[in-house]
Image (spheres, rainbow, N blue to C red):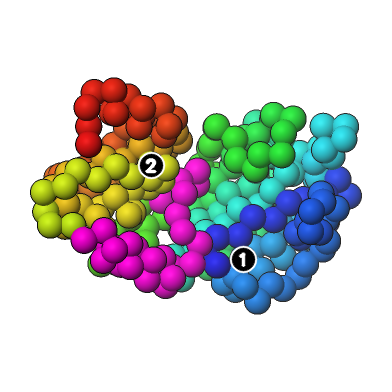
Amino acid sequence: RNKSQYPVSADGQVGFYKARSHQLVPVERCLLQKPPADAAADALRRYIETYRVPGYDEKTRRGLLRHLYIRTNQAGQSLICVLVNGKKLPHEPELVSLLRQAVPETVGVVLGVNTQPTGAILGGEYRTLWGEDVLTDRLCGLTFRLSVPSFYQVNHDMAEVLYRTALDFAGLTGTETVLDLYCGAGTITQVMARRAGRVIGAEIVPAAIEDARENARRNGIGNVEFFCGDASAVAADFAARGLR
């Protein structure tokens, strides 16, 4: 996995939820993910212990720390986001220092605001604490900028197999219009664009659409368009306008 998301319990434990529950199980090592994820989780534990920062309580809706998010690219660089029930954390510079020491190849540390009483991990507001607010990765010979909310396949190597297999099955001749619903950062959109006449991507997350458009620009792909909105509504609109 190139992305990991750790919930934080009310008593400050960092780990994963037990199957089919919200009962947190402390986890120090996970073999399914890249080493920077474990290191970042260890750093967050030290921050919690040192500065007595409260974890989020789902029942009372109090506490600050909700989740730790980290994504690591093929070059070993990581983007880290700490999700909180508020606008800021105490000792933010110290948190950044701990994370950077634990994960030296970090390109940026972002604070994510999520004050909604839901099980959703990500919120709609982000503030950069240090460095960059995006991570860049290479996939299928293309370059992709990825912000925190943007969807990206968690297994890089299998994503390449998946996309190339889909491209082969599609049997494109260069004249077709392809509709990519739930396109995220525009990865499969741009892979398909190599053989299609035109590819349209639809995604409800604004940051992902911004990434997708920038990625197309960086990759020099001009036969793609991206629309921000509910994918089913976008598809219905195109159908009503006679797109086939």
The numbered disc on residue 37 is 1
Marks 2 & 1, CB-CB < 8 Å contact: no
Asked whether, in this view, residue 25 is left or right of residue 148, the answer is right
> Is residue 116 in sight in this rendering?
yes
Find the residue positioned furthest to the bottom: 31
Q: Nearer the viewer, residue 93 or 1?
A: 1
Task: Identify whether 207 is placed above or below 229.
Answer: below
- Tag 1: Cα neighbours inside 10 Å, few (<14), some, or many (≥20)? many
Find out whether residue 168 is within the magenta segment: yes
Asked whether, in this view, residue 183 is left or right of residue 5, the answer is left
Give the labeled residue for mark 2: 181
Q: What element carries label 1?
A: helix
* Residues rendered magenta in the picture: 146-171
> Is residue 54 in sight in this rendering?
no
Residue found at x 41% / y 27%: 233
What's the amino acid at mark 1?
A: Ala
Give percent across and percent down for residue 2: 52, 65
Give percent across and percent down for residue 84: 69, 39
Q: Nearer the viewer's eye, disc 2 or disc 1?
A: 2
Residue found at x 41% / y 51%: 146
Q: Nearer the viewer, residue 196 or 106?
A: 196
Q: In which quadrant will I find the N terminus?
A: bottom right
Residue found at x 36% / y 37%: 202
- Tag 2: Cα neighbours inside 10 Å, few (<14), some, or many (≥20)? some
Q: Nearer the viewer, residue 239 or 229?
A: 239
